[in-house]
Image (cartoon, rainbow, N blue to C red):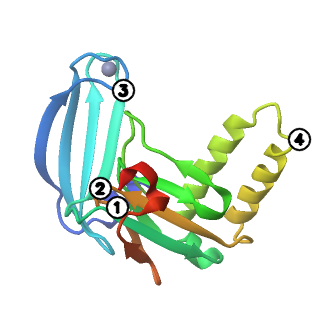
Amino acid sequence: MGEDWIQEHRIGEPKPIFRITARCIACGRPGLEIVEYLYEVPYFGKIILGRGKCKYCGYKYSDVRMAEASDPKKIIVRVEGEKQLRYLLVKSAMATVYIREKGYAMTPGPASTGFITTVEGILYRFQEAIAAACRGREEEEPCRSHIQWIREAIEGRRSFTLVICDPEGTSKVHGEDVEETSLDEECKGQA
Ligand SMILES: [Zn+2]
């Protein structure tokens, strides 16, 4: 998944559209050379992939977003099982991802980047975060319940609502019955 998916499914050659040298997110020196490319891919259409490397520390940067921004938006996906777990999505850098029923949130930080993945891929990221937060307390509550819930969700045995709040409107979920609406209370300070 991720960047590989874009490379494998691209239609035609990518076009470099933007080149910049930025301050490195890892070492702080002005050596992060970023090139953005415009790709055309199935399901999403035009997508921008930014790639870069710091010439001082070797830090690698990659970012994905939809080429055409829309208004700030909230995307809602009702996940009932394996079908929705396979939905492809672009999560842009400034978007926050929630699992509504569990109160889980993946919030953007200063080093956040966008990526392309599936709903299942999002669950793996939450699983990693839960594992890190629960290290050494795996058998205690509430850790035990969280670890079990996320594992069952990945196996398609849990229903839940995935919510993406995107103030820049450059995220997208490809699938049936995906709802898009404007930012609201659930998106908290982002509206
Ligand atoms: Zn660096």
Ligand 1 contact, mark 3 (Cβ < 8 Å): yes
Which element type, helix, strand or loop, lies under badge 2? strand
Residue found at x 50% / y 64%? 163
Furthest toward the bottom, the residue is 176
Cα separation between marks 4 and 1? 36 Å
Look at the image and tell me whether residue 1 can be seen: no
Residue 145 x %, y % = 82, 52
Front position in the image: 34 or 9: 34
Q: Quadrant of residue 158?
A: bottom right
Residue 115 x %, y % = 39, 52
Give the residue number, with chain letter if any, for mark 4: 139
Q: Sequence order check: which comes first, mark 4 or mark 1?
A: 4
Residue 47 x %, y % = 25, 61
Q: Sequence order check: which comes first, mark 2 or mark 3?
A: 3
Give the residue number, with chain letter if any, for mark 2: 65
Give the residue number, with chain letter if any, for mark 1: 171
Q: Sequence order check: which comes first, mark 1 or mark 2?
A: 2
Give the residue number, with chain letter if any, for mark 3: 59
* Amino acid at pointer 2: Arg
* Amino acid at pointer 3: Tyr
Which element type, helix, strand or loop, lies under badge 3? loop
In the rendered structure, the answer to whether residue 142 lies left or right of residue 53 reads right
Q: Are marks 1 and 2 in contact (CB under 8 Å)?
A: yes
Vertical comparison of 119 with 138: above or below: below
Classify the position of the C terminus by image quarter: bottom left
Which element type, helix, strand or loop, lies under badge 4? loop
Vertical comparison of 107 with 161: above or below: above
Callout 4 crowding tier (Cα within 10 Å): few <14, some 14–19, many ≥20: few
* Amino acid at pointer 4: Glu
Callout 2 crowding tier (Cα within 10 Å): few <14, some 14–19, many ≥20: many
Cα separation between marks 1 and 2? 6 Å
